[in-house]
Amino acid sequence: MKNLAVFCGSSKGINSVYIEHAEKFGEELANNDRTLIYGGAQVGCMGALADATLNSGGKVIGVIPQRLKAVEIAHDQLTELHVVNTMHERKSKMAELADGFVALPGGAGTLEEWFEVFTWSQLGVHAKPCGLLNINNFFDPLIAMLDHTIEQGFMNKDYREMIIISSDPKELLEKMDAYSPSYAVKWT
Ligand code: AMP
């Protein structure tokens, strides 16, 4: 996995642990010669992740919609910045460039972006790994919700098992590298 799309908050969160771990993740990407694909903003955990990757000598590609360039303050030091027309274009460009997808803690935007690519793997639209970096146990309630979804008969447990979860950046990336989808896609 050379190119990794990372979805994370445009906010910092209430605890400095979120920014610190976003920075550690960026350093890990750079040290492993992986290219970061992300939303192109300078703000919040997104900005901290991009800065840490660049400061450690890594490559960063941002994809930002024109309308958000000013609001989220497009990062002006990236290796490449794609300015697109819509949110949908942003997501499809990121998906096209990425070999795998990770969410770090974030808000509705982060969750929406990650769930889209996760549902695409359920449907067999792609066969790329989807991971969660579980900083500060942030995703525990989400994982509990997915388990509840399975218990209530709305999701096959095979799809839950496709999700790669770790609080350790190195372990997460190693597991994602080793991922091979061995499931029957939903509608075939
Ligand atoms: P948030 O987690 O809400 O702070 O948002 C993180 C990133 O997701 C920001 O760059 C948002 O602009 C972006 N975002 C929010 N909703 C969408 C969407 N529907 N499609 C693409 N990006 C989005």
Image (tube, grey):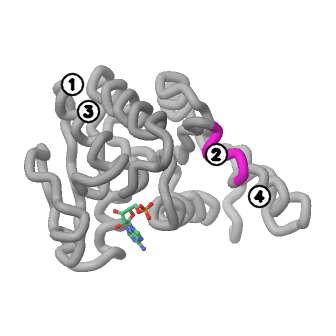
Q: Is residue 182 left or right of residue 20?
A: right
Residue under label 3, please give it.
52
State ligand 1's quadrant: bottom left
SS class, disc 2: strand
Say which residue appears at 49% left-offset and 41% top-offset.
15
- In front here: 161 or 55? 55
Residue 118, above or below 32: below
Q: Position of residue 73 (x, y in %)?
A: 18, 61
Whichever of callouts 3 and 4 sits on the residue coming sooner in the sequence is: 3
Residue under label 1, please give it.
56
Residue under label 4, please give it.
145
Find residue 163 and name its label: 2
Q: Is residue 178 magenta?
A: no
Whether residues under marks 1 and 2 lie with C-beta atoms below 8 angstroms apart, the answer is no
Q: Position of residue 9 (x, y in %)?
A: 42, 54
Q: Is mark 1 within 8 Å of ligand 1?
A: no
Residue 159, above or below 16: below
Q: Is residue 138 magenta?
A: yes
Q: Is residue 165 left or right of residue 100?
A: right
The amino acid sitting under disc 3 is Ala
- In front here: 2 or 168? 168
Whichever of callouts 3 and 2 sits on the residue coming sooner in the sequence is: 3
Is residue 169 visible in the rendered structure shown here? yes
What segment carries the magenta color? 137-141
